[in-house]
Image (tube, grey):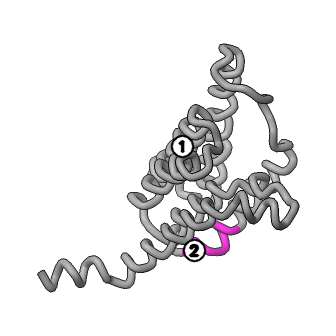
Amino acid sequence: MELTVEKLLSKEKIKIYFLDILSAAAIYFLPALSHMLSFPLYLIEPMRVALVASIIFTNRTNAFIIAFTLPAFSYFISSHPVFIKAGLISTELLLNVFLFYYLKEKIKNTTFVFALSIIVSKIYYYAIKYFLLQFSLMDGVLISTPLLIQLIMILVFTGSFQFLAKDKE
């Protein structure tokens, strides 16, 4: 029993729990923060911010959990994004995590792999979104966040990874 409690309360596990709670709280309060700041915070891709933090500071399993659960959590607490888009975002983030961990075994430069995994997952997202829009399974426009902002965010995420994840190299 004591060994189980020690495992559950290890420094590594506490760091994971803290990051997960912080991620969920950020998603929970995001709509209110957006209104309070009069700035559309979705432009900075808050779910990917949480995913990037999870990849950098925790482990593969937790990154998959974050990728799968944050869009669903957001949908259930705020009905945003709509159900089908939440599913699409979740699969995009799951692909991002999968590609990162798969490709880092094949390619030595993990910073390149990190950026590539984001870019490929975004291409997947827009390809699937295009078909969902074409078949009227989803409303909206194909690209709602300007591509320049997305490129800037990819550079910010990759720079953060390069700076903070030196031990992942």
Q: Mark 1 points at which residue?
A: 90
Q: Where is residue 86 in the image (x, y as percent from the top left)?
A: 58, 40
Question: With respect to residue 130, does 17 lie above or below?
Answer: below
The residue furthest left is 1
Camera-nearest label, 2 or 1: 1
Total labels drawn: 2
Amino acid found under the numbered disc labelled 2: Lys
Q: Is residue 40 rendered magenta in the image?
A: no
Q: Which of 34 and 132 is in front in this view?
A: 34
> Residue at position x 67%, y 28% from top?
129
Task: Name the dominant secondary structure of the magenta segment.
Answer: helix
Q: Position of residue 13 (x, y in %)?
A: 37, 76
Q: Quadrant of the N terminus?
A: bottom left
Q: Tell me, yes or no, whether the two marked residues, 2 and 1, touch with CB atoms within 8 Å.
A: no
The 10 Å Cα crowd at callout 1, few under 14, some 14 to 19, many 20 or more, is many
The residue that appears at 44% across and 53% down in the rendered structure is 64
Residue at image location 57% in from the left, 46% down from the top: 75
Residue behind mark 2: 166
The x and y percentages for residue 76 are 53, 47
Is tag 2's residue or tag 1's residue first in the polypeptide sequence?
1
Left or right of 116 on screen, residue 17 = left
Q: Which mark is residue 105?
A: none
Q: How far apart are marks 2 and 1 (CA)?
A: 27 Å
| 158 lies above or below 102 | below
Residue 34 sits above or below residue 120 on the image: below
What element does badge 2 sit on?
Answer: helix
Secondary structure of the residue carrying tag 1 is helix
Q: Give the range drawn in magenta.
A: 160-166
